[in-house]
Image: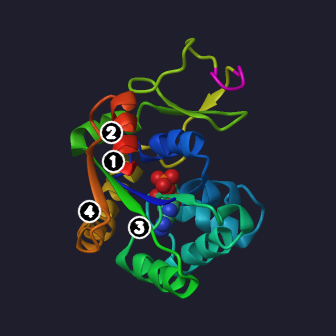
Amino acid sequence: MRIIFLGPPGSGKGTQADILKEKLNLVKLSTGDIFRELSKENNDLALEVKSIMNKGMLLPDHLVTKVVIDRISKDDCKSGFILDGYPRTLNQAVQLDEFLNNANIKIDAVINLNVNEEVLVNRIVARITCKSCNASYNKFTNPTKVENVCDKCGSNEFVTRGDDNEDSIRTRMKEYFAQTYPLVAYYKKKEILKDFDGSKNLENITKEILNALN
Ligand code: AMP
């Protein structure tokens, strides 16, 4: 199965993509995670990527598309993948379609999580990531089982993302509505868009997504 997650920053697409990856045994490809890793390197590209990401702006289409296509061409993606955070512009969606058409691959579903803007900002500022294993949590919507202890690895060190500050959040919202939101209509026209209310609780959304995919 091949799935794309759409939704504004903070809509919970990364969390739902992680759950679905486990349940459906698929490879999850998060462009945000890939470029956060790349930005830790010590070279000019890493510095540029980090600066763009911290401002909340989008990275160039050709760079992101190349990374995604290289990754989904690998053997472990042959039986399916989940794209989280890509495509994010119409140009990326067209570039992806070109590649998929040539490779004779079809996207089964585009999962669109709708959440209103005020809820999003409150969610984003409550986001934390485990420093050792990268597991992500939200102090309100997806807290650790034991306060300040990672469920997955037991670490008690958490970090917040460099781009989860107010200025950057505002820019990311603007970028989303200007550049990414048009993809909702793009995939609706292809009749593969499935809409969900992302403000419901986490387990309910997962259930609804799994039902819709079955
Ligand atoms: P995310 O973790 O998905 O919120 O992505 C964090 C940041 O990575 C974004 O604000 C962009 O700077 C960059 N990024 C991730 N995916 C893309 C993409 N598909 N196109 C352009 N920039 C991206």
**Earlier-in-chain disc, 4 versus 3:** 3
Density class for disc 1 (Cα within 10 Å; few <14, some 14-19, many ≥20) is few
Circle 1 is placed at which residue position? 212
* Type of amino acid at the residue the image marks with label 2: Glu
Nearer the observer: mark 3 or 1; the answer is 1
Residue interval drawn in magenta: 150-155
Check disc 3 and report its element: helix, strand or loop.
loop
- Pinpoint residue 94: horizontal percent, then vertical percent: 41, 82
Q: Amino acid at mark 3?
A: Arg
Marks 4, 2: nearer the viewer:
2
Question: Visible in this render: residue 161?
Answer: no
C-alpha gap between disc 4 and disc 1: 25 Å
Q: Amino acid at mark 4?
A: Phe
What is the CA distance from the residue labelled 3 to the residue labelled 2? Answer: 24 Å
Question: Mark 2 near mark 1, Cβ–Cβ under 8 Å?
Answer: yes
Residue pointed to by mark 2: 208
